[in-house]
Image (cartoon, rainbow, N blue to C red):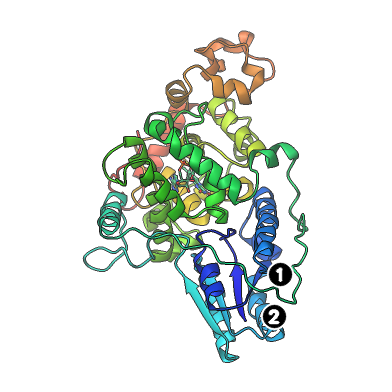
């Protein structure tokens, strides 16, 4: 008997470990509930709820193939070897199959599990599935991990030209086993169930993920490059939660994008090329996580930035977290995060720069807060995004190029539609004042809306000085304007 250990790969289609297990013979699936570990990793309640809802869908799909899905408790990952071994012995499992996960704790967990199984004569097979390229397989000529995205991407393109990763066929139905699937819990203690409105934005299941991908690849992808920076428009795929939970695979995404672009990934439609580029950023940050494990330990990629004199400003941090900074674009973005579990990419950069530059608050505070609220929270992408914005990361924004939130707002939400949607108290302002109600002066200000907590100009100067004073200054990287 084979055991498939499901983690961040909650799908039936194009699931390498699942298909490998099923091709070898009768299979059973297991998922471990690890609330203590999840809390240590700051996993958001809405994300845990999304996992459970997807597990429930997957359990039904597996049921149709007579593959039972079992649920076991392993409060922290140190418990995983014992729990899995017991299950293997009980079911006379000869091999366990799992798709690779990246990060220090994930790798250590898998090494220890593999060792414990091996000692008991049980094989452990792991597969590349979450990424297009295995970390360690895309390296510089001197054999090191790339630190610059454009160079990394070039090698990825060369690889893709030579051979495209193929999709794996879904497993066939097997003969019925005498094992019942477990009930999938609808919640896990310590993780509050999100409201119906949030849940409705993120329906569970592969059908929904596929629908989003198809709708995006059929039409929206053509406008991706020109629309993706405008938060009031539905210009991006909104697939991140599905990719993070593995309800859809990067291979499925790549194939859909290629199909819409006559098989081209470097040329042809600019929208498809730009979108594939984003899939490669996802790839890049996961490779960075493996190649430079310090980022997995919440250390700065650029060690010299560890000396930065971050400010301890709990009240300003709370204002940022609670969407009351008095800067409409920041507050609207933070409300979007709090209410939907997701934030538009442009705004993730804007609020992250505001926190780490204008407020000069440690990027780790923002990283943790995002992780605790994002439905798509992913260590590699979140850490990469935060370190990019705070200029502490690889190929990150140069420290002197600080976004001005008001100019960003005027440029990317020029009519103020996004702001007014999330801050209805500003609905009465015209499209000029809505970006900066403080301009109206005290008497004409909006009664319910706070004054800015920080002066953008002096705080910018303060940030520049803090970065300039670092022992060895970083060189300028590429990035967004
Ligand atoms: C401070 C900050 C924190 C972030 N935290 C996360 C996170 O926890 N999880 C996460 O998935 N993304 C994160 N991102 C990246 C990006 O904002 C989201 O992936 C994107 O907004 C998701 O929306 P979408 O699915 O519509 O993306 P699309 O624009 O449609 O892109 C398609 C997919 O590509 C991947 N992707 C896109 N941009 C990036 C990027 N810059 N880095 C890595 N992958 C990318 C995502 O998987 C995304 O679903 C963060 C960015 C910043 C600046």
Decide if residue 208 is on the left or right side of residue 411.
right
Examine the rendered structure and indicate whether residue 404 appears above or below residue 3.
above
Query: Where in the figure is residue 212, as x and y percent of width and height?
Result: 54, 41
Query: Which residue is denoted by mark 1 in the rendering?
Result: 70
- Helix, strand or loop status at disc 1: strand
Q: Residues within 10 Å of mark 1 (few under 14, many from 20)?
A: some
Examine the rendered structure and indicate whether residue 458 appears above or below residue 198.
above
Screen quadrant of the C terminus: top left
Looking at this view, is 34 or 205 the one in front?
A: 205
Q: Residues within 10 Å of mark 2 (few under 14, many from 20)?
A: some
Which labelled disc corresponds to residue 362?
none
Q: Is residue 452 visible?
A: yes
Residue at (44%, 26%) from the top-left corner?
Answer: 408
Looking at this view, is 256 or 431 the one in front?
A: 256
Query: Which residue is denoted by mark 2 in the rendering?
Result: 87
**Could you tell me if the residues under marks 2 and 1 are in contact, i.e. CB atoms within 8 Å?**
yes
- The earlier-in-sequence mark between 2 and 1 is 1
Residue at (55%, 20%) from the top-left corner?
Answer: 417
Marks 2 and 1 sit apart, C-alpha to C-alpha, by 10 Å
Query: Where in the figure is residue 438, as x and y percent of width and height?
Result: 56, 17
- Helix, strand or loop status at disc 2: helix
Picture mark count: 2
Screen quadrant of the N terminus: bottom right
Answer yes or no: disc 1 within 8 Å of ligand 1: no
Looking at this view, is 336 or 213 the one in front?
A: 213
Residue at (71%, 36%) from the top-left corner?
Answer: 197
């Amino acid at each position: 008997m084979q055991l498939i250990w499901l983690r961040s790969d909650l799908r039936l289609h194009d699931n390498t470990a699942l298909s490998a297990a099923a091709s070898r013979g009768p299979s059973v699936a297991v998922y471990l509930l690890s609330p203590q570990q999840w809390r240590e990793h700051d996993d958001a309640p809405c994300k845990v709820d999304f996992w459970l809802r997807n597990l429930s869908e997957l359990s039904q799909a597996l049921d149709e193939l007579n593959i039972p899905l079992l649920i076991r408790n392993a409060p922290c990952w140190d418990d995983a070897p014992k729990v899995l071994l017991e299950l293997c012995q009980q079911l006379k499992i000869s091999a366990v199959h799992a798709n690779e996960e990246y990060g220090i704790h994930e790798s250590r967990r898998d090494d220890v599990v593999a060792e414990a199984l091996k000692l008991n004569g049980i094989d452990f097979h792991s597969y590349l599935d979450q990424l297009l390229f295995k970390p360690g397989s895309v390296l510089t000529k001197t054999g090191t991990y790339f630190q610059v995205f454009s160079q990394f991407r070039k090698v990825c393109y060369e690889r893709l030209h030579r051979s495209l990763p193929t999709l794996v066929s879904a497993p066939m139905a097997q003969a019925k086993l005498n094992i019942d699937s477990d009930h999938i819990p609808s919640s896990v203690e310590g993780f509050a169930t999100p409201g119906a409105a949030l849940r409705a934005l993120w329906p569970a299941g592969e059908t929904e993920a596929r629908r989003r991908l198809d709708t995006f690849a059929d039409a929206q992808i053509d406008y991706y490059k020109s629309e993706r920076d405008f938060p009031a428009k539905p210009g991006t795929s909104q697939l991140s939660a599905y990719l993070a939970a593995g309800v859809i695979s990067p291979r499925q995404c790549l194939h859909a994008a290629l199909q819409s672009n006559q098989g081209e990934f470097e040329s042809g439609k600019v929208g498809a090329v730009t979108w594939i580029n984003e899939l490669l950023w996802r790839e890049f940050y996961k490779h960075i996580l493996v190649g430079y494990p310090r980022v997995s330990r919440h250390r700065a990629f650029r060690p010299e930035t560890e000396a930065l004199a971050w400010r301890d400003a709990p009240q300003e941090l709370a204002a940022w977290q609670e969407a009351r900074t008095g800067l409409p674009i920041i507050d609207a973005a933070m409300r979007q995060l709090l209410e939907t579990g997701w934030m538009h990419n442009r705004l993730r950069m804007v609020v992250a720069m505001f926190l780490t530059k204008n407020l000069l608050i440690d990027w780790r505070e923002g990283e943790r807060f995002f992780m605790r609220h994002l439905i798509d929270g992913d260590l590699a992408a979140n850490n990469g995004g935060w370190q990019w914005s705070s200029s502490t990361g690889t190929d990150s924004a140069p420290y002197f190029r600080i976004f001005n939130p008001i100019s960003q707002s005027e440029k990317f939400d020029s009519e103020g539609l996004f702001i007014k949607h999330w801050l209805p108290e500003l609905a009465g302002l015209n499209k000029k004042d809505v970006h900066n109600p403080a301009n109206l002066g005290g008497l004409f200000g909006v009664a319910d809306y706070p004054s800015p907590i920080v002066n953008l100009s002096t705080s910018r100067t303060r940030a520049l000085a803090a970065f300039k004073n670092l022992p060895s200054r970083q060189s300028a990287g590429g990035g967004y304007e």
